[in-house]
Image (spheres, rainbow, N blue to C red):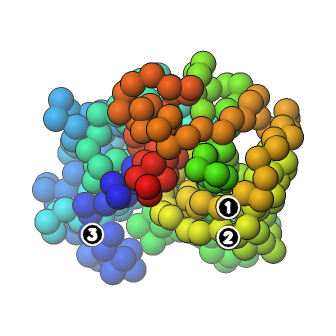
Amino acid sequence: MTAPGFTGGLLDRADRLRHDEEALAAAMGNWQSRLLRLHEFEPEVTDDGRLGWTMLTEAPDEAEFVLLGLDEGKARFAAFVPGAAAPPAFRSPNLFRVLDQLRPGEAATFATARALLDWHARHGFCANCGTATAMFRAGWGRRCPSCRAEHFPRVDPVVIMIAEHDGRALLGRQPSWPAGRYSALAGFVEPGESIEEAVAREIGEEAGVAVTDVRYVASQPWPFPSQLMVACVATATHDAITLDEHELEDAIWVTRDDVRAVLAGGDGPFIAPPPYAIAHTLLTWWAERH
């Protein structure tokens, strides 16, 4: 199975440096350290699908540095500007184009940077007492100077799944998607809920289909803003769709031949999700089972 998008990171995350202020300061002063080139949270990408980097001195004067990791022993950073607005929830046409160009390992580095910078932009104040917080641990945490609470980046688990019945897979579409695009159903895992329970609940809520035998397939970090997509497949007990129109515009059953044709670039009853999305990985995995 092809590795899901945004996985296969190339950097040593160097947790040891996050706790060593002296070593971190030395890395920030090293001329060989590099800063990720971002414009409004979107990366600059070379013609061969690599991320663009520059000197740390190119960062704005007020910037704070987030350690992304080490590349052959050389530190790699992203810059956070205090007070900067969080990136928009939607992805621009330029970002769609860039994500299609990025090599797999490079995309993983961007995903880390995007998620961390978004988190800093949204968590400038203590959730405990409301005081403005300060970055620590090389950008992997924020500390409140008043109540001393420490806050760390979190990811939100999301299940994304195919229900299968009689050799067909259930797909749905949201009205905001490009015309003709269908994908696996998805939804956030709720408090007090297992992954298996979330899969069954989401399919039942969105399409009215009951499922059993939920199986894990793969996972993917999704930095818009900071989610962990958990891909699964489940067995449907029936194929009658009762659509929740608040969640989906449409839902359809597709055969493996349909999916194979679409993934190969041919005609079919839907347009596939982009290759960097784990829904594409999940559909590929399912189409290859038989």
Residues under numbered marks 1 and 2 in contact, where contact means CB atoms less than 8 Å apart: yes
| Residue 254 can be seen in this image | yes
Q: Is residue 10 above or below residue 252?
A: below
Looking at the image, the residue that sits furthest to the front is 166
Give the residue type that dot 3 points to. Asp
Task: Return the disc, 1 or 2, that comes first in the chain's sequence.
Answer: 2
Q: Which residue is mark 3?
A: 12
* Label disc, if present, on residue 159 of the rendered structure: none
Task: Note whether 93 is above or below 8 in the view shown.
Answer: above
**Which residue type does callout 1 highlight?**
Thr
Q: Quadrant of the N terminus?
A: bottom left
Mark 2: few/some/many CA within 10 Å (<14, 14-19, 20+): few
Amino acid marked by disc 2: Asp
- The quadrant the C terminus occupies is bottom left
**Residue at the spot 45% in from the left edge and 48% down from the top edge:** 287
Instruction: Name the residue carrying label 1.
Output: 235
Q: Is residue 41 visible?
A: no
Spatial CA distance of label 1 from label 2 is 6 Å
Q: Secondary structure at mark 2?
A: strand
Q: Position of residue 218 (x, y in %)?
A: 48, 63
Which residue is at a point 25% across and 61% down the rendered structure image?
10
Residue at the (60%, 33%) spot, across then down: 182
Position in image of residue 283 (x %, y %): 49, 47
- Closer to us: 275 or 162: 162
Q: Name the residue: 58% across, 61% down.
A: 232
User: For this view, does 38 lie left or right of residue 30?
Assistant: right
Label 2: which residue? 213
The answer to which quarter of the image holds residue 260 is: top left
Tag 1's secondary structure?
A: strand
Q: Nearer the viewer, mark 1 or mark 3?
A: 1
User: Counting other residues with Cα less than 10 Å from the Cα at mark 1, is it few (<14), some (14-19), or many (20 or more)?
Assistant: some
Which residue is more in the foreground, 178 or 136?
178
